[in-house]
Image (tube, rainbow, N blue to C red):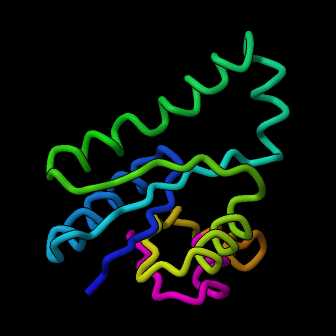
């Protein structure tokens, strides 16, 4: 049913729980593929670049966020690929999901309280509102 699954991660525990759900769903359909997306946030990228020793160190720091995510997927022998995108997380994830026409988008919830979500918004909330495909938000 879900052949192409987009998994948006940031290296947090919420992302790990979302990964477990994406793997469980992908395991139900033979030949399914999970595309893991990590967005290098522009607002944080400047600070990362200033504090890194070079391009290689910056890439290693970003890949470290994916270690546990990849481990979870590999344990279940599910096909996957990793894509690091650049931009503001919410719009970048939505744009990628809509351009590539995924069957399902899986994203973790940050767990903001109602007031924080009303004032700040959350990446998962922005994605749910704007993505063309079904979205699973994992708490």
Q: Is residue 49 above or below residue 4?
A: above
Identify the residue at horizontal 16%, vertical 51% (top origin).
Answer: 77
Query: Where on the picture, by quarter, is residue 69?
Result: top left
Q: Is residue 7 above or below residue 130?
A: above
Q: Which residues are magenta?
A: 124-139
Q: Is residue 77 above or below residue 99?
A: above
The answer to whether residue 114 is visible is no
Front-most of residues 40 and 112: 40
State the quadrant of the N terminus.
bottom left
Q: Is residue 82 magenta?
A: no
Measured from the top left, where is residue 36 in percent x and y? 45, 55
Identify the residue at horizontal 74%, vertical 70% (top origin).
Answer: 91
Q: Is residue 113 left or right of residue 40?
A: left
Identify the residue at horizontal 79%, vertical 25% (top origin).
Answer: 49
Measured from the top left, where is residue 96 in percent x and y? 64, 69
Give the residue furthest to the front: 31
Measured from the top left, where is residue 24 in percent x and y? 19, 68
Identify the residue at horizontal 57%, vertical 72% (top origin).
Answer: 124
Front-most of residues 47 and 30: 30
Q: Is residue 80 left or right of residue 48?
A: left
Measured from the top left, where is residue 10 in percent x and y? 53, 49
Query: Where on the picture, by quarter, is residue 137?
Result: bottom left
Query: Where on the picture, by quarter, is residue 136?
Result: bottom left
Give the residue furthest to the top: 53
């Amino acid at each position: 049913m879900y052949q192409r699954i987009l998994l948006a991660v940031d290296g947090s525990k919420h992302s790990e729980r979302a990964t477990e759900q994406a793997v469980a769903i992908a395991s139900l359909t033979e030949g399914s593929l999970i595309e893991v997306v990590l967005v290098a946030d522009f607002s944080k990228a400047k600070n990362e670049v200033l504090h890194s020793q070079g391009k290689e160190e910056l890439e290693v720091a970003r890949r470290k966020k994916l270690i546990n995510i990849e481990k979870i997927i590999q344990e279940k022998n599910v096909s996957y690929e990793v894509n690091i995108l650049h931009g503001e997380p919410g719009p970048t994830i939505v744009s990628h999901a809509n351009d590539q026409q995924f069957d399902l988008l899986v994203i973790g919830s940050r767990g903001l309280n109602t007031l924080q979500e009303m004032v700040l918004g959350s990446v998962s909330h922005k994605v749910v509102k704007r993505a063309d495909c079904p979205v699973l938000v994992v708490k």
